[in-house]
Image (cartoon, rainbow, N blue to C red):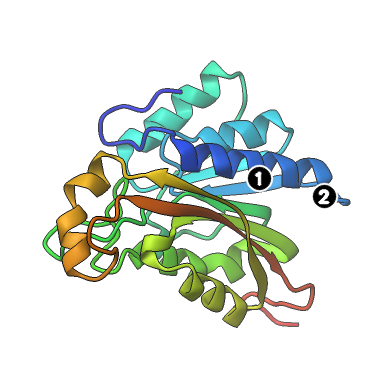
Amino acid sequence: MTAPTGVYRPSVDSAMLCRRMVNHMQTHPKGVTSVIELCAGSGIASVYAALAGARVTAVDDTRESVEAVAVNAASNDVTVDVVRSDVRALPRLDPADLVVANPPYVPAPAHMPDGHAWNAGPNGRSVVDSIIGVLPELVRPAGAALLVQSDVCGVTPTLSGLADRGFDAAVTDEVVVDFGPVMHERALWLESQGFIEPGERTERVVVIRAVRSTSAVPRGASR
């Protein structure tokens, strides 16, 4: 997979998301025909979804990512519609059977720009919370979302936010991993802000599966 400078290079969290996504697609009793990937990065999940037969839309806010998705889709001989947009200002998209995202989730000092590859604001939730907010408009009733994040930015708020929006959410996969270069570089700041314990250099990465109620109606829609 091509991942040029500035584009998140697929890692453990990417593999977790893809594994759960493919499993969901293969075992869903009614099948999954449409997938949206938010914060697509290299588009690895989009490529896997397209290879599994879905109609796929990949969304990212950087030119580098949009180009990487196009290259990776072409090299795997699949079609992926690519939309350049911030998740906080999405154009109208048709709701999908499945929405997946591996968003930036690393807490960052306020002076650092968020939303690109890993930085996600002072509490690490600026992008995660934005995704939770738009899911009711992107996931069809009875559809699902798969979201990857670290426990450093809080799993409970994600589960609560999803429940508040009509989703039945639970952690379906998790792994404890050593800090990567970004987290190691930021470890002392994370300690000072109370995100990790002194000397802690591992994090729990989780996949959250959220199933939308069959009676749910997107905001602005009529019953």
**x then y, percent, for residue 20:** 65, 45
Residue contact at pointers 1 and 2, CB within 8 angstroms: no
Foreground of the two, 37 or 162: 162
**x then y, percent, for residue 143:** 73, 61
Name the residue: 43% across, 49% down: 39
Q: Is residue 98 above or below residue 129?
A: above
Nearer the observer: mark 1 or 2; the answer is 1
Decide: few, some or many residues near mark 1? Use Cα within 10 Å; few <14, some 14-19, many ≥20. some
Q: Is residue 135 above or below residue 27?
A: below
Residue that mark 2 sits on: 28
**x then y, percent, for residue 46:** 57, 37
Name the residue: 56% across, 42% down: 16
| Quadrant holding the C terminus | bottom right
Foreground of the two, 134 or 203: 203
Secondary element under disc 2, as helix, strand or loop, is loop
Which of disc 2 and disc 1 is earlier in sequence? 1
Q: Is residue 30 left or right of residue 35?
A: right
User: Can you tell which quarter of the image residue 179 is in?
Assistant: top left
Label 1, label 2: how far apart the Cα atoms are: 12 Å
| Amino acid type at mark 1 | Arg
Q: Is residue 65 above or below residue 137?
A: above
Numbered circle sitting on residue 20: 1
Q: Is residue 189 left or right of residue 25?
A: left
Q: Is residue 190 left or right of residue 30?
A: left
Secondary element under disc 1, as helix, strand or loop, is helix
> For the view shown, which residue lies furthest in the right direction?
29
